Image (cartoon, coloured by chain):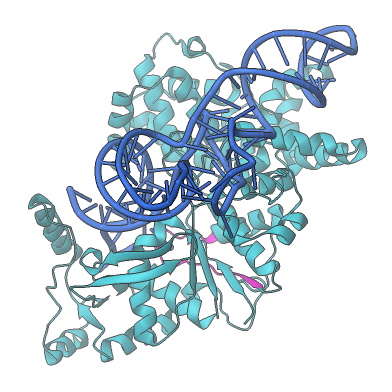
Chain colours: A cyan, B blue
Amino acid sequence: MAVRTRIAPSPTGDPHLGTAYVALFNWALARQSGGAFIVRIEDTDAARSIPEAERSILDALNWLGIDWDEGPDAGGPFGPYRQSERLDVYRGHAERLVEAGHAFHCFCTPERLERVRAAQRAAGENPGYDGHCLNLAADAVAERLRRGEAHVIRMRVPEEGVCRFRDALRGEIEIPYSQVDMQVLIKADGYPTYHLAVVVDDHLMGITHIMRGEEWISSVPKHRLLFDRFGWEMPEMIHLPLLRNPDRSKLSKRRNPTGIEYYREAGYLPEALLNYLATMGWSMPDEREIFSSAEFLEAFDAGRIVPGAPVFDIEKLNWMNGQYLRQLDTGEFVERFKAWAGGGDRLGALAPLVQERTERFSDIAPRVDYLLGDRQPLHPDDFAHKRLERETIVEILFRAARDFDGVRPWERDGLHAACRASAERLQLRMGDFLFPLFVAVSGRPVALPLFDSMALLGRETTRARLRDAMDVLGVSGKQLKRLEKLAREPG
RNA sequence: GUCCCCUUCGUCUAGAGGCCUAGGACUCCAGGUUUUCAUCCUGGCAACAGGGGUUCGACUCCCCUAGGGGACGCCA
């Protein structure tokens, strides 16, 4: 049987390195055996889905040189490839489970569930659904449904026993059912949860190998149960190691640039990034480290994936990117540089800002350096300000980094509005509030207009610079904790 | 806390019982080439988490401990 693999990103933010990493291996597994690689958009979270994210994820994969045979843009025989367009499919399957007694309607409110979990935690038990609606009488359920009462569909889970399954990298894994919650399958808004949708689609789309991040291992019992109850064969499971921050936590934007856009903006070559990603948890049989994607596709062997989670090391990526850059012939080097510098019409957008401030062409370069390349390395003294204390400056940086996540689209006016709102909340003058941002973004107390600068640099690069500034200022653990607590509160 | 996964130089890794005096790469250090710098070349520092087994023989197999990570949502 032909191999069919997929990548299933959810369009809830900017394209993530982890998505590219998992895509790379799925792509390789399919390509090297003449199978098919599929992109499926898992937009089942109506609240968190961002319409333009799908486009940027596809663009990012494209940029990296990963291509797919079936997907939301490419079409294919098993479409649609966007889960929000398959709602009736999931609904139908969930109802099948209800009829067979494998799932049930649940009318519990989120508030009640929260209370239950809090109580369980307080009593030292594992939080989980308490079975409140498990045995409601059929006619009572029918009546409540007829009245249109809000409800979800949950799956039944055995109370005892263990779930056994095989992971291609780790062998047999056993997870006791006591650890498996009665997972919601259909949410109150009618959308399926990941767990239902992924199983239904993987089967309907003929997926033969599920290759995904290690964070899903503990969900396999739920999926296993669903495959069994539908009477379907479960695809082969391959859980890839998780990419990590230098501090060994799961790779996250709080600590690292995780957006593919960042690497694109910073001037990494897609083939270098892809090559580097391929050496995370995998190696060529001859230990060669520099290889093209064609060579990778040729040599790929899932059996050579190591299960230990690798740290994403930018230093080594830098070295590798340098190798690629230097091996270009000069003509191509110039072409690639021009394509990068002019990317997104960077130069065009820059021109009017620079023109007003220019007396001689030689003024230009020092003025725009931070927009075209890395800004000056920062020093804590750069942030010295007559009215702002260090604490306040850190808070401004932190708030800005957080608030900018919500600015969509990434444009000047939205950034301006976000800053104005934050400045008001902190009761600071706009000029004072903006000062640390100028320094963090440009490396100087004054620069080209801040909002235009940030718009030009892009979300990822801006975030990276704000984070770097906080590092330079040396945010203490205690302060970070306080700020993160603050970040969880709205406003 | 419960469950699961993982564990070779600081980092990425090679190693599928004797080939290991544990190899390569990044970083770092020292030399060399280069008018500077970078590149490049040469050399160096640096690891099998700990303890028990199994075996004639363990980095490799098994167990325990420790450490790290992940999951415990009407998020994916």
Q: Quadrant of residue A424?
A: top left
Q: What segment carries the magenta color? A: A36-51
Q: Residue at x 43, y 27 (%)?
A: A397
Residue A484: x and y in percent read 32, 35
Q: Is residue A342 placed above or below A238 in the rendered structure?
A: above
Q: In this view, does A179 lie to the left or right of A311?
A: left
Q: Which residue is drawn at 54% across and 76% down?
A: A207
Q: Is residue A353 left or right of residue B66?
A: right
Q: Is residue A237 placed above or below A471 in the rendered structure?
A: below
Q: Is residue A331 left or right of residue A191?
A: right
Q: Which residue is drawn at 38% across and 70% down?
A: A165
Residue A143: x and y in percent read 15, 89
Q: In which quarter of the image is residue A216?
A: bottom left
Query: Which quadrant does the C terminus of chain A fall into?
Result: top left
Q: Is residue A69 visible in this depiction of the protein? A: yes
Q: In this view, does A214 lie to the left or right of A120?
A: right
Any magenta on residue A42? yes
Q: Which of A142 and A179 is in front in this view?
A: A179
Q: Is residue A71 placed above or below B19 in the rendered structure?
A: below
Q: Which of B49 and A468 is in front in this view?
A: B49
User: What secondary structure is the stretch in magenta mostly built from?
Assistant: loop
Q: Which residue is drawn at 73% across and 18% down?
A: A366
Q: Is residue A355 placed above or below A106 in the rendered structure?
A: above
Q: Quadrant of residue A300?
A: bottom right
Q: Which of A103 and B20 is in front in this view?
A: B20
Residue A87: x and y in percent read 43, 79
Residue A1: x and y in percent read 62, 82
Any magenta on residue A198? no
Q: Is residue A193 visible in this depiction of the protein? A: no
